[in-house]
Amino acid sequence: MTDLKSETAPLQGLPLVIAIMTIAAANFMSFLDMTIANVALPPIAGGLGVTPHEGVWTITSYAVAEAIAVPLTGWVVGRYGSVRVFIAASFAFGLFSLVCGLSTTLAMLVAGRILQGLAGGFLVPVSQVLLQTVVPPKHASLGVTVWGLTALTAPVFGPLLGGLFCDTWGWQWCFFINVPVAAICVIVAMSILPKDRGATARSRMDYVGLGLLVLWVGAFQITLDTGEQNDWFNSFGIILLIATALAGLAVFVIWELTDDAPIVDLRVFRHRGFTVATIVMFVAFACIAAYNVVFVLWLQMAIGYPAIWTGYAMTYISLLPAVVAPLIGFLMTRVDSRLLISGGLFVMGGTFLCRVGYASNMPFEGLAFMQAMTGMSGTFYFVPIMGMAVAMVDREEMASAAGLFNFARTLSMAFGSAVGIALWTRIAAMKHADLAGMLNAPDTMLAGAPRLGVTMEQARGLIESGVQTEALMLATNQMFLLMGLATCASSILIWLAPKPAGQFGDGARPLGDNQMLLRQGEDTFRNVQEVQLVLEEALEAISSHGRFH
């Protein structure tokens, strides 16, 4: 594996600012497309003449391709260099976004999403690596902070922007919007980013490992996406997919650990700090993914929010991260990273637990406040844990570590979303049955309906609607409880990681001239001020629309 620190040289002055903005834009674009098409499924299905279930492949195809590409980053970067991979991935992402927008059939759209997902899968970890290599060591915390901020906010803006595009210009613009951004990223990267230098690894392609990766990840993702509609373990097809995923994973791990040139370097898990950070991130991100999907469904199905106002409610989770990110960059140079991560996760778990008492008449202001608190606490854990995970490994393993870390993040989001929907649906069904059995003399209530000016059918519908609303509310509260407990537990688990020496790392594997990443937080605080103001103005413009009526 090539030494990534020797591939690129740090930048200074205006070129550094432009490079950071370009890399952040590419990272934001990739994260955005994970969620922007979610709310566009009905328009896409209607426009292409397919069923909503068939339209789900628009999301599944992207997720599978991205999950496969992310762990390959270490091998690809070692073979071609980080800057070349960034430019090629940005170009491919824009090109296949154009293909998606121009699609006239489902097959064409799915093919475009697969290729778009492959490009996006490389963009995320490569942008993480570049932000840590082109930024001078004294400003290194700025790169980590910017990457973490885009990773946290982009998925939240996805549903909002997707809804706006579908309501105004059409679902195609969910993909067209990437084209100019990708073009700018390619042009700027070719002009400003330092050229890859140093020998690249000429290792052979591990075709067996690649095939096994595609097999088990594909089976796992399809299981998660189709399990609920096929009643999970009551379906022979789902059982077969689960068996294929487990068997494929077992053979994949054995092959990669014994192969001389593995396509995915699983040996990075020998570093205890990296392993613990990855596990904690998996649990926390699974809870966040479950929360996002359950919260959205509850707002629309129980509270009656339209899609656009659901997007507004979700956007509040991105308000405070823009404000506290510079502070985190400052604190990471002075506080044990484990303390920041643990504290952030504990507060996030607390925000979930505070929601256990929600009622179906919860005002918008209360929803927005807790959303903002969740976003703030998430920033305190995600930014440090991302840097901690990568800095715990050897320099030549940095790309592999970044790829595996983001691979685990991708799988955790898919896992959390699928499990969250399944649990929420089943709990709601049980609560509905319990509430229906507790109704006091329903026949008497229906018999008196004509005196109130409603028919029997209307009265029955009103009762059913009330029972369903409360069942969904009870199920949502129970999910908040489970997510809160799991998140609080992960805040304790992070202390199994070794104590960081300096800022990140275990003291034996510092990054670059024995200088640890993320020092000089004062520089981060100053440099991010302008970016912070821009984000705050944009978010305030969204929130100024007022409360939901």
Image (tube, rainbow, N blue to C red):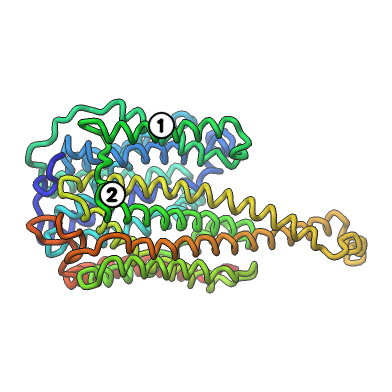
Q: For mark 2, does the 10 Å Cα neighbourhood hold few (<14), some (14 to 19), or many (20 or more) residues?
A: many
Front in this rendered view, residue 68 or 525: 68
At label 1, the amino acid type is Gly
Mark closer to the observer (1, 2): 1
For residue 113, say whether it is visible.
no
Q: Residue 26 carries which label?
A: 2
**Secondary structure under badge 2?**
helix
State which quarter of the image contains the N terminus. top left
Q: Quadrant of the rendered structure where residue 337 is?
A: bottom left
Q: Is residue 116 above or below residue 469?
A: above
Q: Which residue is drawn at 47% across and 47% down?
A: 415
Q: Which mark is residue 248?
A: 1
Q: Which amino acid does label 2 sit on?
A: Ala
Mark 1 closeness class: few <14, some 14–19, many ≥20 residues within 10 Å: many
Q: In this view, does 543 lie to the left or right of 7?
A: right
Residue that appears at 37% across and 53% down:
279
Residue at 53% across, 60% down:
482
From the top left corner, tell me how far across and down residue 159 is, in percent. Answer: 47, 53
Could you tell which of marks 1 and 2 lies nearer the N-terminus? 2
Q: Does residue 112 sit above or below 313 in this rendering?
A: above
* Residue 368 horizontal/vertical position (percent): 49, 70
On the image, the x and y values in percent for residue 111 come to 41, 31
